[in-house]
Each structure stands twice: as structure tokens, then as C-alpha cells.
Image (cartoon, helix red, strand yellow):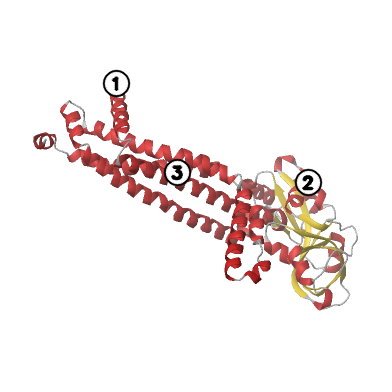
Amino acid sequence: MSKLNWILFVARRFAQVDRSGRSAVTTFLASLSICFGVMTLIVVVSVMNGFQQGLIDSIMEISSAHIRVTPESSFDVAKFQEFCANPENEIIVAEPFYEAQALMVGLNGRQSPALIRSVSPDIFKRDAGFAKELRMISGSFDLKNQNSIVLGSELARVLGVRLGDTVNLLALSGGSDVDLLSDNRLFTVSGIFTCGYSDINASYSFISLQAGEKLFGQNAPMFYNLKIKDVNGDSRVIFRLQQQVPELSAESWRSYNRSFFGALRIEKNLLMMLVLLIFVVVGVNIFNGMRRMVFERREEIAILSALGSKKTQVQLIFIIRGLLTGLFGAIPGLMLGLSLSVSMDTVFTIISKLAFYTQYFFVMITNPGMASFVRENPMYQVYARIPARVMPEEVVFITVFGVFSALVASWIASRNIQSLSVSEVLHDE
């Protein structure tokens, strides 16, 4: 402890002397670089988490669920329902549905491919996750009438239909007893929804389970969407399910969406690698500054060595200086990054206003007649409505990495102390 005390004392004295002059500027810029690096990486990763998690939540709550079950011909429905009702199996919702592809025709002959999913009329009440992610912007999720249909917002826009209009399923991929083309599969739009995934908005539509049984034919397979308490416990639930009800095949959300989730993971990892290069540049700057500091302090180093201190102890003085440089940069960067992440809606709104007024200013200078056509970019408002999601483990990793980069740069730069000859330095002086 006594050795550590004098090391800390000397490091503090060096820091006091270096508060003015070139060393102070170098140390301040190094800490500032780490601060902005930590802040930028936290904000970028949190915003990307918000975008990606919005897509993932929409897919898992609306499209694939946590486990998709496909029954076989000898499927025992009673045994399956008994399994789902057992609390030990961790199943929250077991929702049956039919699914088929269709060519949908709206007003004025507008056509669009669509995925028709037949679900229970009360799914909106029983499945809290489904109701949370599927937000109704017009009408309601009312499928009590067998001729009612709920459309995605982009699908409704392409078809040119609104609440109360009629659409026709002109072509339908059903069983062998279903006509491919028909002009009589008419449905009335009872609701229009939106979610965080544009592909679902552009292709999904929902009808009642009774309408699906009638529409898709007797040979149409029925599927089940299972949602469990612990999303990461899907393998455990699938194992139990196949042990107790072997007459089915179950697929986890991991394998069902493997390519899409894999692409999101690669995108995030590449972005983190690119932004982490900031710390590499900062580390190089700290390395150069610390090498110069070691050179400027060679007389003090020689005197400390002559008084009996080990070179590793003298090296520890400069490593502590690097640690403090990293901490003074990483901690403010952490606070700024968290503050910006939780208020990204305000940030995007400010950016939208700045971009609008900047564009308006230059248009007024160059072509005043076109100023009335300048509008704010609506995408900023879309981004503002997507909340950033802060992952504690990622924030800790980024902060520690910022400190670690300064620590490693200081350690590498201070290794020259090991080769410093005390007698030569004192002889030169």
C-alpha cells in the first residue's frame, strides 16, 4: 500500500504540472476524443437497437410468434391443448390460424399480392403482444362478421381502399377443392393497421377463422402460433412438446427468421466495428502523446530510479495517467450518450427543423418562387417515433472499451522506460 501511495502521489504531481502547456492540450484532446467516441457509439447502437427491435418485435408478435407448430395427419388436438394449458410448459398463447397467398383487387381494379391469415376473432383481446405491435389507425380489429377483413396500411394504400370499402380475393392459393380464380370472394374492410415492419404493412391481411375454414378448403393445413414466457427458452419448450405430442413439427423463431435476423446481427456488428475505429485513432493519439511525455520526463524517471524505485513502478505512474485520461473521457461520454439516447425524438425533431430552415434559406436566396414548395422531410418524424433502446451490457462494454483503449496505449508507450539507462540520463544532465 505504501508503494502505491507514492506512485499515486507522483502521478498526481505530474498531472498538476502538466495542466498548462502542450501536455495539457494533448491530454484534454485525448479525453475529449474518448468522450465523443463513447457518446457516439452509445447513441448509434441505441438508435439501431430501436430500429431493429421494432422489426423483431413486429415479426415475432404478428408474423412468426416464438414457436410455429405444424400438425400432422394423426395430430391429437386434446393432448396438444392439455400441453398448452399446463403452466409448467410456459406457454402464454396458443393461437390456431390458416394462411394463404392471394392476389387482392381493390377499387378501380387496383391489384396487389397479399398474405391472408385467418385468425380467431378475439385474438386482439387474448394476445397482448399482438395487440401492442399491431396498431389500428382506422376502424378496429373486428372479425366477428365472416366477410370482414383487416388490411395493412401500405396494402390498403396500394389498393386504394378505406374503411368500409370492398376488396376481392381474385386469385387464392388454397386446397385442391378451392378455385384459383373467383370474382365472388368479397370482403369489407373493417380496419386498417400499421406496425414497425413495412413488409407486414404492405402484405398482411386478417380474416376470421371461420371465414378461413370456408375459404381455404378442407385440405388447407392449420398452424399454431405459440408464445412463451421466456423467448430464449424456445428449445426447451420444443423438446417438451415433441416428447409429449410427437404428431407435429415445431419450428423456433430463431430458425424461422434465421436469414433476416442474421442480416440484422451482421449489420449491427459491422456498424459497431466501424465506430470502434474511433477508439483506435484515439489510442494512437494517446500513444504519441504519452511517448513524448515519457521523453520529457526522462530526468525525473532517472532520479526516481536512482532513489530505488523499480522501472515497473515508474511505468505504472504513466499507466495511471492513461487510466485517468480514459476515465475523464468515458464517464462524461457515458452520461451524454445516455441523455441523447433517451431524448432521440427531440433530437430528430431539431434536426428536421434545422434541415428545413437551411433548405428554405438557400431556396429563398437562389429561387424565391420555389420557397412555397419546401417541406420538412417526413422521415425525421418517423424516426422520432421509434424509441432508442439502451442495452445495459452494450453500454458497459462501450464505456470499458473506451477506458481500455487509453490504458493499452499508455502501457505500450511507457514500455520505453524499461530500456532507459539511468546513468546515461544523469551523465547527460
The count of marks equals: 3
Q: Is residue 258 above or below residue 313?
A: below
Q: Is residue 217 above or below residue 69?
A: below
Mark earlier in primary sequence (2, 3): 3
Residue found at the far right of this picture: 145
- The image quadrant that residue 189 belongs to is bottom right
Q: Is residue 260 left or right of residue 167?
A: left
SS for dot 1: helix
Foreground label between 2 and 3: 3
Q: Which mark is residue 82?
A: 2
Q: Quadrant of the C terminus?
A: top left
Q: Nearer the viewer, residue 10 or 1?
A: 10
Q: Nearer the viewer, residue 406 or 394?
A: 406
* Residue 200 showing in the rendered view: yes
Q: Amino acid at mark 1?
A: Ser
Residue where numbered disc 1 is placed: 2
- How many angstroms separate mark 1 from mark 3 (CA)? 33 Å
- The image quadrant that residue 405 belongs to is top left
- Can you give x and y, in whole percent of width and height, for residue 237 in the image? 66, 47
- Can you give x and y, in whole percent of width and height, for residue 230 in the image? 65, 44
Mark earlier in primary sequence (1, 3): 1
- Dot 2 and dot 3 residues touching (CB under 8 Å): no
The residue at 45%/40% (across/down) is 330
SS for dot 3: helix
